[in-house]
Image (cartoon, helix red, strand yellow):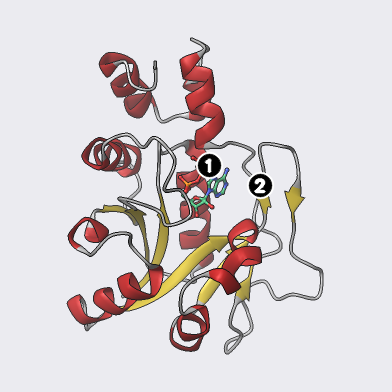
Amino acid sequence: MKIGIFGGTYNPVHLGHTALANYICNLGLVDEVWLMVSPQNPFKQDHQLLDEAVRYRLVTLAVRDFPRLRASDFEFRLPRPSYTYVTLHELALAYPDDTFSLIIGADNWAKFPAWRNSADILAHYPVIVYPREMVSGERLMISDGDSDGDATNANPIFLPSAPLYPISSTAIRCALAAGDDVSPWLDPAVHDEIIRQGLYRQ
Ligand code: ATP
């Protein structure tokens, strides 16, 4: 199978994550998307992260009605901090019958040269890049000349027409801490679990 790896902290997972992953599945670029929960993002070491097992459990709830989306805790068993080139290499070893690609937003694509062994990643794995709208309202689009996933040998594969989902986990955490209603941005079961456990209330 062709599997797209969509990594993140998922602190917490929201509807933007699952909608985008589902959109990419429906394009036919991959057979499945794995939402891979990062135990510790090298770029986010200072952030207060909810326990990884709790974040993973929320992702399993969020994907339960999407047959081609999976929650993955694969990085929990790897050395920390988890670097994407290591994760991809270990995935290829653990699942020799599958092929892996990486799904990242235009915000991460802009920072991609700073990722450890980024050239190695590009040389060995397709990288799928989609536009991002940030909480600030800033839109990181992909230029008109870029492909929409139809160029067979292009890497990265740009998806300029992918929809924007102006939601972020940061905004959701802030709203929860302020006691605001975040139900429009979350899967109902994820929302129930967050409220039941009083998560992100500070
Ligand atoms: P935070 O606000 O805590 O930084 P986030 O939601 O921006 O969180 P992650 O939890 O790391 O980011 O998200 C996992 C993956 O989903 C990352 O690749 C991130 O770029 C992407 N992503 C996050 N929010 C959206 C969104 N609204 N639309 C599409 N992709 C998103």
Residue visible at 74% across and 75% down in the picture = 146
Residue visible at 48% across and 26% down in the picture = 173
Image location (x, y in percent) of residue 118:
51, 78
Give neighbour class at mark 2: few <14, some 14-19, many 20+ (Cα, 10 Å).
Answer: some
Image location (x, y in percent) of residue 131:
67, 57
- Relative vertical location of residue 15 with respect to residue 182 in this rendering, above or below: below
Total labels: the figure holds 2
- Quadrant of the drawing holding the N terminus: bottom left
Residue 54: quarter of image: top left
Residue lying at the far top in this picture: please name it.
179
Q: CA distance from mark 2 to mark 1?
A: 8 Å
Residue 187: quarter of image: top left
Residue lying at the far right in this picture: please name it.
144
Query: Which residue in the structure is indicated by mark 2?
Result: 164
Query: Which residue in the structure is indicated by mark 1?
Result: 16
Label 1 secondary element: helix
Image location (x, y in percent) of residue 158:
65, 71
- Relative vertical location of residue 173 with respect to residue 41 in this rendering, above or below: above
Horizontal side of 39 relative to 176 (left or right) equals: left
**Some atom of ligand 1 lies within 8 Å of the CB belonging to the residue at label 2:** yes
Horizontal side of 175 relative to 132 (left or right) equals: left
Question: Contact (CB < 8 A) between labels 2 and 1?
Answer: no
For the residue pair 35 and 84, the one nearer the viewer reads as 84
Q: Earlier in the sequence, mark 2 or mark 1?
A: 1
**Some atom of ligand 1 lies within 8 Å of the CB belonging to the residue at label 1:** yes
- Quadrant of the drawing holding the C terminus: top left
For the residue pair 199 and 166, the one nearer the viewer reads as 199
Amino acid residing under circle 2: Leu
- Relative vertical location of residue 103 with respect to residue 50 in this rendering, above or below: below
